[in-house]
Amino acid sequence: MADMRLIVAGAGGRMGRALVRVISETPGAVLAGALEAPGSELLGKDAGVLAGLPENGVKLSADLWALSANADAIVDFTVPGATIANVAIAAERGLVHIIGTTGLSASDMAVIKSVTSHAVVVQSGNMSLGINLLAALVKRVAQSLDESFDIEIVEMHHKAKIDAPSGTAFLLGEAAAAGRGVDLHARSARGRDGHTGARRPGDIGFASLRGGTVTGDHSVIFAGPMERIELTHRAEDRTMFAQGAIKAALWARGKAPGFYTMTDVLGLADF
């Protein structure tokens, strides 16, 4: 089978550059295009050089329609507005769409899922193997413990991160809610401040910390009477997210149209 031809969205950013590097190291994958925002000062720059590699001849462009004429997939770690703009073009062109963008709203997710009757989308708030295994463990623990164990999710990221809580924190919250059989949006507690009163039984709490250059730390705490269980993942390099995303792209090639997650990619659906 020919190499899978991949477009990297946000190719000039930190994740985009990591994706370009990982594609160059991955058998069966080849960089077919590098997408950047209109007006970016990086347009026309060589994607390989920006990623710290030898020149590869792939220049950053703002024209996804043109880039997608000779591609099989787009790997998209950008911002919600850009991702939603990419959804329709990717679906019309028949591209597999790998979405690692965080901060997506319920309406954004509705737009993404609206194309999955005829397009392949793999979306996750976190593409790493470790985080997705952690989510499976969180779901199982939440199933096993009753509401006498309070669930709190604590995350920390670098000071430049623009959304909070992180997409990964929400992924872990959804896993906990699924284990408890509740709706996360109805039972989440965020942004406690001032005289809040006692903690409401059954809530799933979130706390966000920002500072320094932290790639991503996440802990899920089950705090019960006289004991506490803590499940923690610490990310050391964003390369692991890029590796997971490229693994997802290769996995999704030839799949039936539908909405998939990293749980599907990693075979954890029945864990």
Image: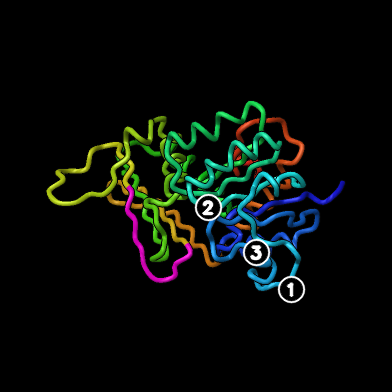
Q: Which label was assigned to residue 44? A: 3
Q: Amino acid at mark 3?
A: Gly
Dots 1, 3 in contact, CB < 8 A: no
Q: Amino acid at mark 2?
A: Thr
Residue 129, position as x, y percentages in the image: 60, 53
- Between residue 98 and residue 247, name the one nearer to us: 98
Q: Which label was assigned to residue 112? A: none
- Between residue 143 and residue 99, name the one nearer to us: 99
Question: Helix or strand or loop: what does disc 3 sit on?
Answer: loop
Mark toward the viewer: 2 or 3? 3
Disc nearer the start of the sequence (1/2): 1
Residue 135, position as x, y percentages in the image: 50, 46
Q: Amino acid at mark 1?
A: Pro
CA distance for labels 1 and 2: 24 Å
Asked if residue 229 shows in the view, the reply is no
Asked if residue 255 shows in the view, the reply is yes
- According to the picture, the residue beneath numbered tag 1 turns out to be 54
Q: Is residue 44 left or right of residue 193?
A: right
Q: Which label was assigned to residue 78? A: 2
Q: Residue at x 63, y 26 (%)?
A: 117
Asked if the magenta segment contains residue 59, the reply would be no
Quadrant position of the C terminus in the picture: top right
For residue 233, above or below residue 56: above
For residue 188, above or below residue 24: above
Q: Is residue 173 left or right of residue 57?
A: left
Query: How packed is label 1: few (under 14 Cα within 10 Å), some, or many (20 or more)?
Result: few
Disc nearer the start of the sequence (2/3): 3
Q: Residue at x 55, y 65 (%)?
A: 41
Q: Residue at x 39, y 71 (%)?
A: 212
Q: Which residues are magenta?
A: 206-215
